[in-house]
Amino acid sequence: MEEQRGMQWLIDRFAQEPARAAFIHRDRTVNYGEVVELIASFGALSAKHGIARGDRVAVLGDYSPELFCMLLALALNGNIVIPLSREAVVEKENALAISGCEWLIEFDETGISASVARHEIAAESPLLATLRAGSQPGLLLFSSGSTGKPKAILHDFDRVAEKFSKRRGAVIAIPFLMIDHFGGINTILAIVSSLGTVVTVANRGIDSICHAIEKNRVELLPTTPSFLTMLMASNLYRAYNLSSLKRITYGTEVMPQGTLDRVRREFPDVTLQQTYGLSEVGVMRSQSRDDGSLWVRVGGQGFQTKVIDDILWIKSEYAMLGYLNAPSEFDADGWFNTQDRVEVDGDYFRILGRVTDLINVGGQKVYPAEVEDVILGLDNVSDVAVFGEAHALLGNVVVARVLTTEPESVTELKRRIRTACSAALANYKVPAKVVLADGPLYTARQKKRRA
């Protein structure tokens, strides 16, 4: 297999400290020397099967040393890599119908053994042709499709990795976001590029995460507000020794102030950091104003920001090449409309929510997160999702789907919610309808499900 120069720096870095622990996977430690060997062996395996430069290769599985090494081996071979998770929000068949495919590599449940098979699905795009013409490796990810058909997002894989060429401090961390999510790829590259240790988990349940932190002395937990809300409501963190944690980062959705306040009280020695990024532009460097603040400064080398009509726009050197199945959303000067409405205070932003999540009640705009924040402060409420429901006169009304800790009648729950919201919010923001939830309110990607 001919090696691609663009990502060779990462392999060379691994080789510098071969004895360092790179992965802890199912109680098995794999060091960086073994990672280098795995990448070489997967390169040879790909060559044996005849995977050619420019071929599209779907890789199905979850985090493991072997799966990660396969991704890098394919990138070095100049392939267009399509990571897929078994819990993906976009089904494999739907994803590959958009992207096309030449090969499918499927890892078993252990993440160790993989099958390689020809898997031809015809679909072409000028973007793919351009990438192949430059012999560049590609990274193809999919949006959740929450507002319509999933979008196929194509990145230059070398450019995605190049963001991490400057080595930072090594940490022991759990890659919480999935391998088919840009944030998941970003997290694992950030960990290994600094020769840290990736701790994998069999599932992303609260018990599983807490157990992994305690057992492996995890220092960094990159997660979502939805997970932290459930963690705080469960009180399960008190059953584990989580004293090794030094930093918790959170992003992908708006953080309720009540959840942030509680996390800060329960983990006073842990730095809390809000992160910000999008699959289209990459993940930016961020700095929270302080641990208890939702104000954040974002940017860093390669990124520019501006605000137009209260909407955040980003210009990025690490931006996607484009969508395979949709028009570009960048303007002529390379700026991307994030659709995130923000408040501005000097260099800091406070993210209010996606324009697409706003509820229009008789011409008045309601941010779901501000209503959720009030409801989460009530007793016997472990989680809540607020969304709009069509109404003949008002256009929409506010609906709250609530998960309670203990059984409670919907009549009493609605009374308490309406009383609390009426005291804190304008009348049009008060939920007109309250529904009891019968299960988790978040997706497989640990983001709030508002529907």
Image (spheres, grey):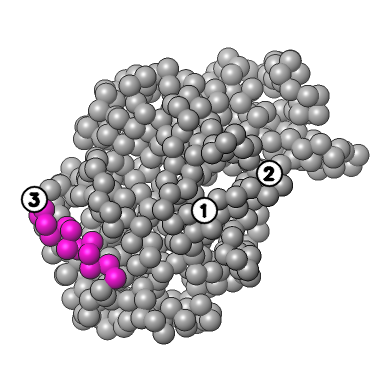
Determine if the magenta segment contains residue 11.
yes
Task: Write down the quadrant of residue 349 in the picture.
Answer: top right
Q: Is residue 288 above or below residue 62?
A: above
**Label 2: which residue?**
310
Q: Position of residue 397 (x, y in %)?
A: 79, 35
**Residue 64 visible in this rendered orientation of the protein:** no
Determine whether the residue tagged by mark 1 lies in a helix, strand or loop.
strand
Q: In the displayed orientation, state which residue is furthest to the right.
A: 393
**How far is the residue under mark 1 from the one under mark 3?**
39 Å
In which quadrant will I find the N terminus?
bottom left
- The residue to which callout 3 is attached is 19
Looking at the image, which residue is at 71% across and 18% down? 424
Which residue was labeled with disc 1?
304
Query: Chief secondary structure of the magenta span?
Result: helix
In the picture, the quarter occupied by the C terminus is: top right
Nearest the eye: 89 or 317: 317
Q: Quarter of the image holding residue 132?
A: bottom left
Q: Is residue 370 magenta?
A: no
Mark 3 to mark 2 CA distance (whole Å): 50 Å
Label 3, secondary structure: give it. loop
Task: Tell me which segment is drawn in magenta.
Answer: 6-18
Is any atom of residue 259 visible in this view?
yes
Q: Residue at x 43, y 22 (%)?
A: 264
